[in-house]
Image (cartoon, rainbow, N blue to C red):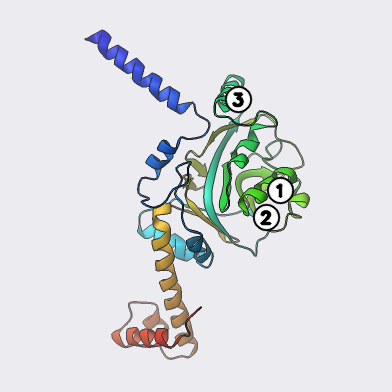
Amino acid sequence: MKKLTTLILLLTLGSFYSIGQRVGSSPEYIKALTSEWKGERFADGRPKVSDAILARLKNISMEEAWGVLKNKGYNNQYEGDWNIMLPDSSMTGRVVTAQYIPVRPDLQNQVKEQGKVEGRAQKGGTNSWPIDILTSGDVYVADSYGKMADGTLIGDNLGNAIYAKSQRGVIFYGSVRDVEGLSEIKGFNGWWKGQDPSYIKEMMLLSINAPIRIGRATVLPGDVVLAKKYGTIFIPAHLVEDLVLTSEVTALRDEFGHQRLREKKYLAGEIDSEWSEPIKKDFLSWLNSRPLKS
């Protein structure tokens, strides 16, 4: 019995190790991570949140999105204090994650060998692998543990490849190089912690589309990101549509309240608390009088 138990344990550990040594997460693993999503998925297993919802999300404020998530118990989805290429432009998209760690030769060799098994490019650095799988609407999000010098994940060459594939940009908890060249890529945007002229050195890719940490936030593959000059917030795919709807209603209530305060129709305390029945009726009347958007 003891030998049988030991054999089962070894087989279980062997199976776990075999799964764990993948560079890119399997579709089955991504589906398990995002099991609360019930809609369409990409071939890699990530939730396929619609382009229409991504477009509407761009109009949602950071505070509105944060508030909805907090009310649902998601308290660790925001990260701020970024260097932003185009601070006056917001970005939304479906997250592709990558994890980088300091180089350890034996592990790096294993990652490269596993990359061959998974059919990943063998020319160039492994930091091109996450870029190779991007599709339209994806945002490349990477944790490179805040490394500045010798930690630059991309320059303008990889930046062009990213934009060509995704029509989006990047969010890096780390650094980039050749920001001047990146700035010439029309439409490309980026949120990162710093920049440096050096090349990537003594840093290796560990995983693609696995859970990562971006500062204060926990990020899963297939999350939807809302990135603005006020910060970034990573939204679980199964909550995005509800968040957009809730936030749009909140925005309308705020617009109504601000207008009525400017008109001095109500006192601040009346608006900044639970509304009375007359105010609720006034709000509904105000809504009905608004022109419909095409």
Which is more N-terminal, label 3 or label 1? 3
Q: Is residue 46 above or below residue 62?
A: above
Q: Mark 2 or mark 1: name the one nearer the start of the chain.
A: 1
Using the image as rendered, state which of residue 43 and residue 200 is in the foreground: 43
Badge 1 amino acid: Asn
- Cβ–Cβ below 8 Å for labels 2 and 1? yes
State the mark number for residue 188.
2
Q: Dot 2 lies on which element?
A: loop
Residue 135's tag is none
Residue tagged by mark 3?
112
Q: Label 2 sits on what residue type? A: Phe
Q: Is residue 75 visible?
A: no
- The tag earlier along the polypeptide, 2 or 3, is 3
Q: Amino acid at mark 3?
A: Lys
Relative to residue 258, is residue 136 drawn left or right?
Answer: right
Q: Which residue is mark 1?
A: 160
